[in-house]
Image (tube, rainbow, N blue to C red):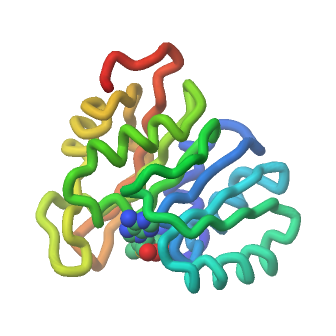
């Protein structure tokens, strides 16, 4: 996909310029670059992945293409506790489909957000996986999963055709401002 396609997928989920954002499962940073583009140079971005080599390449690319954006990289497994909090937004693009039991991960992502913070998810529009995309979830499934994990106001942003599994969608959902009753 082209950079412009990645920007189009996430743009409407990013309310204002700036803020502190995390890209969870950032890989080599295709969506981190889109995030830097949309959120602008006043944003601070933390890119998290368990692959340190991918994060090294991400830093080089981001430094070259968006030198004014503050970037931090963190090598971590997002299925384990991560002591980061108060993000205005988190992006998870093509990374949550590696997790079979998504609810505990989603609950810890919810706690990484400030109240009212946004979670943008980009995923394949399928509920049946393959060896490369083991546990995908369609948008209707995502509406249910996000609500069960205590998010609110979930909405579909974009859909795009994809060579893999037919289509891709992007969605935004929010940590409630009042503390959630789901624990
Ligand atoms: C398909 S790549 C997507 C990369 C990027 N978000 C994108 O869309 O271009 C999935 C990434 O998620 C990372 N990942 C998968 N499970 C993870 C976990 N439990 N903790 C941290 N990173 C994980 C992988 O290392 C890989 O870089």
Q: Where on the picture, by quarter, is residue 3?
A: bottom right
- 6, above or below 13, in the image: below
> Where, quadrant-wise, is the C terminus in this rendering?
top left
Foreground residue among 125 and 79: 79
Q: Where on the picture, by quarter, is residue 16?
A: top right
In the displayed structure image, the side of residue 128 where residue 58 appears, left or right:
right
In the displayed structure image, the side of residue 2 where residue 68 appears, left or right:
right
- Residue at image point 56% right, 26% down: 116
Furthest-left residue in this view: 128
- Residue at image point 80% right, 76% down: 63
- 39, above or below 107, in the image: below
Locate residue 38, reporting x and y percent. 69, 54
Furthest-right residue in this view: 68
For the question of whether residue 5 can be seen, the reply is: no
- Residue at image point 81% right, 61% down: 69
Locate residue 143, reporting x and y percent. 27, 37
Locate residue 54, reporting x and y percent. 56, 82
Counting labels gives 0
Locate residue 127, reporting x and y percent. 15, 58
The image quadrant in which ligand 1 is located: bottom left
For the question of whether residue 125 can be seen, the reply is: yes
Foreground residue among 62 and 75: 75
- Residue at image point 35% right, 48% down: 105
- 70, above or below 12, in the image: below
């Amino acid at each position: 996909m082209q950079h412009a396609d990645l920007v189009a997928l996430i743009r409407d989920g990013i309310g204002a310029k700036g803020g502190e954002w995390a890209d969870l499962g950032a890989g080599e940073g295709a969506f981190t670059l889109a995030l830097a583009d949309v959120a602008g140079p006043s944003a601070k971005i933390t890119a998290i992945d368990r692959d340190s080599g991918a994060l090294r390449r991400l830093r080089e690319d981001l430094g070259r293409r968006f030198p004014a954006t503050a970037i931090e990289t963190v090598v971590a497994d997002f299925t384990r506790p991560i002591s980061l909090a108060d993000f205005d937004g988190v992006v998870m693009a093509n990374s949550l489909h590696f997790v079979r039991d998504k609810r505990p991960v989603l609950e810890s992502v919810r706690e990484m957000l400030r109240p009212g913070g946004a979670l943008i998810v980009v995923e394949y529009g399928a509920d049946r996986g393959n060896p490369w995309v083991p546990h995908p979830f369609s948008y209707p499934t995502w509406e249910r999963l996000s609500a069960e994990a205590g998010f609110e106001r979930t909405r579909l942003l974009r859909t795009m055709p994809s060579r893999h599994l037919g289509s891709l969608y992007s969605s935004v959902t929010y940590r409630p401002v009042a503390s959630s009753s789901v624990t």
